[in-house]
Amino acid sequence: MDAQPGKLDDTTARAALRRLLDAAIASADPRVVLAAHLPEPPALGSGGRVIVVGAGKSAAVMAAAVEAAWPRIPLTGLVITRYGHGIRTGRGENDRIEVVEASHPVPDAAGEAAAARILAMVQGLTENDLVLALISGGGSALMPLAAPGLTLADKQAVNRALLSCGATINEMNAVRRHLSAIKGGRLAAAAHPARVVTLAISDVPGDDPAAIASGPTVPDPTSFAEAREIVARYAIPLPDHVRAHLDAAAEETPKPGDPRLAHAEYHLIATPLMALQAAAKEAEALGLTPLILGDALEGEAREAGTLLAGIARSVAAHGHPLRAPAVLLSGGETTVTLGEAKGAGGRNGECLLGFAVALAGHPGIWSLMADTDGIDGSESNAGAIAGPDTLARSAAAGVDPRAALLAHRSHDVFAGLDDLIITGPTLTNVNDFRAVIIAGAPAAARP
């Protein structure tokens, strides 16, 4: 595709957007990137064992990548992934790493039981042993081992409240860590004195290890007091005994400098920025000038869409901050505050609908917004595509996109237009991916 001024039409723009998404997802495939980050296994004759544990939407394919890279290394283990994301980790019946599927985003008993098994697996080890932790987005909900005195039902109630209150992912995980027996560095502490090496795929703005799956193998910089402040700020309803647990602050999470985490290492093997850079390279191959706006954009989804629409207008009208034909790339994780609305869709659909409403049919601008794990919110689509005709086509179909935006029902709009992006589970997760293509050069900027 040659994206010279005036050459982009609806068909080529949509095809280009899909190629950018595919490039971003491919760059985070554990089967491609994980092996280069594996540590040295225990020395022969040391008696050291290799225990592989983990949780997240990518956990099963990460485990398969470990087995493929270490075909003759004795190892055992267990990882937890989302329902529908499990794969065989070995060849035939010779899986050395067990895969358990569990519920996400609200935890269930399968995840709880598997998390308890993981915690038991890493106890009683020696300094000659290696614990390889495979961590990716979604691991917090998939590994829901409650702190003493709390129950799975408590964790489920808190998760539901967190998901609808408008808190950021970092804030949600700060609360989760202080209600857990395994997160916030507790898994690595339980494995002491073994060496713990974590290979992680980041799905959070800023790539903070403490926030990825609530940081089961890293020190927790937050406190019970901060968790209580987040609960108060968002008026999150908690069962009385959960609130009492936060108030009591009986056992803090391991903090930086804790000797139990002295032999813990952490390596990021895929991040949102890496995915955006891969998409930018693909954009250049398509004849588009890319601009990465950032990998950590947060805020209310519909408002982020309005902001992105304003930048796209500036490119189209003034050639700033770059000249068209161009593509604006961004990542991060926006939020949707539902209030009393039930909603249908996810944060990417809502951001995209806010973008389309703000553009009001502006010509020559298209956008794709999707979750790189293949699931955007409450439905089965990864995201959707919008173009200059989105509002007109919606009106012709008898759907009011502005009313749908207010009701948090972006899925209804894009499903009715057949503009949903369906990838199925991608088996990776580097957070949200947003691409905005602006065609042509502004009249004032043309030679």
Image (spheres, helix red, strand yellow):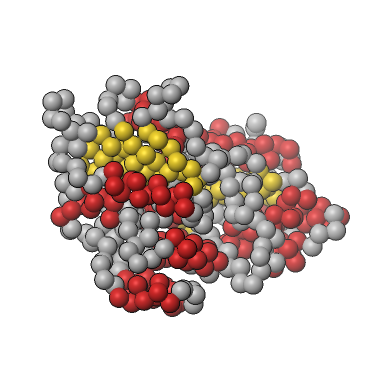
Using the image, determine if residue 73 lies above or below residue 195.
Answer: above
The front one of 55 and 21 is 55
Seen from the viewer's position, the closer of residues 244 and 355 is: 244
Q: Which residue is at 65% across, 41% downward?
A: 422
- Residue 38 position in % (x across, y down): 29, 33
Check the image and report above or below for 403 versus 217: below
Camera sees residue 365: yes
Q: What's the residue at 18%, 53% (across, down)?
A: 260
Residue 23, horizontal then vertical, whole percent: 53, 36
- Relative placement, left or right, of 126 versus 416 is left
Residue 140 is at least partly visible in this image: no
Q: Quadrant of residue 355?
A: bottom right
Percent x, y for residue 391?
Answer: 78, 57
* Spot occupied by residue 190 in the image (x, y as percentages of width and height): 24, 51
Q: Is residue 150 above or below residue 291?
A: below
Image side of residue 308 versus residue 133, left or right:
right
Question: Residue at 40% of width from left, 72% of height from top?
Answer: 242
Query: Dividing the picture into quarters, in which one does residue 254 lie?
Result: bottom left
Q: In which quarter of the image is the C terminus?
A: top right
- The quarter of the image holding the N terminus is top right
